[in-house]
Image: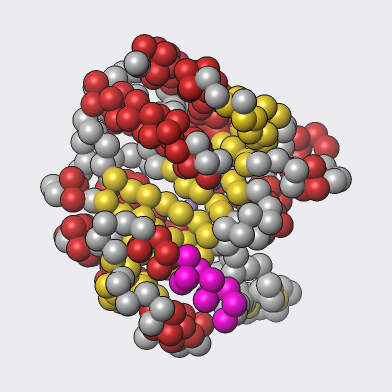
Amino acid sequence: MRTHNVAVIPGDGIGTEVIGAGKKVLEALAKKNGDFTFNFEEFDWSSQRYLDQGQYIPEGGLEKLATFDAIYFGAVGSQQVPDHISLWELRLAICQGFDQYANVRPARVLPGVNSRLQHADKIDWVIIRENSEGEYSGNGGRVHRGLPDEVATEVSIFSRKGIERIHRFAFEMAQSRPRKQLTLVTKSNAQRHGMVLWDEIFFEVAKEYPDVSIDRELVDAVTTRMVLKPETLDVVVATNLHADILSDLAAALSGSLGIAPTANLNPERQFPSMFEPIHGSAFDIAGQGIANPVGSFWTAVMMLEHLGEQLAAERLMAAIERLTASGLQTKDLGGTATTHDVTLAICSDIESQA
Ligand code: NAD
Ligand code: MN
């Protein structure tokens, strides 16, 4: 019997609701498979903890977290804490602390889900977001206050090492997919230092992957291509900020923010990787029991793949697709089902499968 030690950080708002749902589904799956189990340990690292005790992550927290096989994360964000504090003190502290430099965001329209986009069935993308440097590296920026004209700087740092490793990761991803196509997205016409280095290194690394077909696009132009010619994209690699924005667009085009998953990977496996739905804590629907848990289920598929449970991952993805196809959908997809209804349905589907 294989045991997977998973640290669970539900966080805030609907993060706690969808991660609770995801855990139930993972338990049902492990029971059905019969040859592995989860050892879940829950961490109360949330905005409430920050408000009560002044810290999201207690002393020694990251060291403790480092001993797990994977991290299953909900969302963080509260109306009582500025967003830049919750983001940097919890989520980015983990991503950066564990060098989770490759952020993987698949986007695809699941059966039965309606997209606003006419040719949404053509969407089958993986967006690779550089997750350790650039606009979110947090170094060097300042607000110069006290003068009549206040000035703020936001420094984005890119290194050859950081660029090279994300490009290589993206090429490997493209190579593993049927179409083997990779689009480089930058903004090297306006951002003429970091982005130029991104472009240069991309074409260097490309030489090692002659079987991958490549092209490049500016970030503004690629948004129109995503909407107007979705079938022309496969794998996309972009910086932290650019890919953050593109992946929310991708999620909306494929039906709802409530469906999309993401993995923050430390590909060398020196540290645990973290898996989370891409949405936030959703103040407007938190506590109502109507959050769409599908994003947390798809996230669980990515976590299972990472843990080497390929069969269980395929089983869960198939169950998710039967679920969305069945029309049992939450409000964000136009249905009336609750988080609980959807969770119950997928658990009984998993239990009843041969
Ligand atoms: P959000 O993703 O929380 O919500 C955006 C909209 O999408 C809302 O209308 C919400 O109801 C809807 N939505 C999101 N997930 C849904 C789901 N599973 N089911 C149904 N509807 C869903 O983004 P926001 O409103 O910009 O941010 C709210 C808070 O979350 C902020 O504090 C923000 O900083 C934080 N946030 C955290 C993360 C994270 O932890 N990774 C990501 C994004 C935002
Ligand atoms: Mn985002």
Q: Position of residue 350 (x, y in %)?
A: 40, 18
Residue 299 belongs to magenta span: no
Left-right relation of 181 to 257:
left
User: Is residue 217 shown above or below 203?
Assistant: above
| Residue 158 x %, y % | 57, 78
Q: Is residue 80 visible?
A: no
Start-end of magenta stretch: 160-169
**Residue farthest right in this picture:** 59
Q: Residue at x 40, y 68 (%)?
A: 171
Name the side, left or right, on which 25 lies relative to 219: right
Q: Within the image, what quadrant is residue 215 found in?
A: bottom left
Q: For the N terminus, which image quadrant?
A: top right
Q: Quadrant of residue 145?
A: bottom right
Q: Single out the residue that lies furthest toward the left.
A: 118
Residue at 28% x, 66% y is 181
In this view, the residue in front, 166 or 116, is 166
How is the model colour-coded?
secondary structure
> Which residue is nearer to you in this view: 175 or 291?
175
Q: Quadrant of the C terminus?
A: top left
- Front residue of 24 and 16: 24
Question: Could you say where residue 8 lies in the image, as x and y percent from the top left?
Answer: 64, 33
| Residue plotted at (80% across, 48% down) | 63
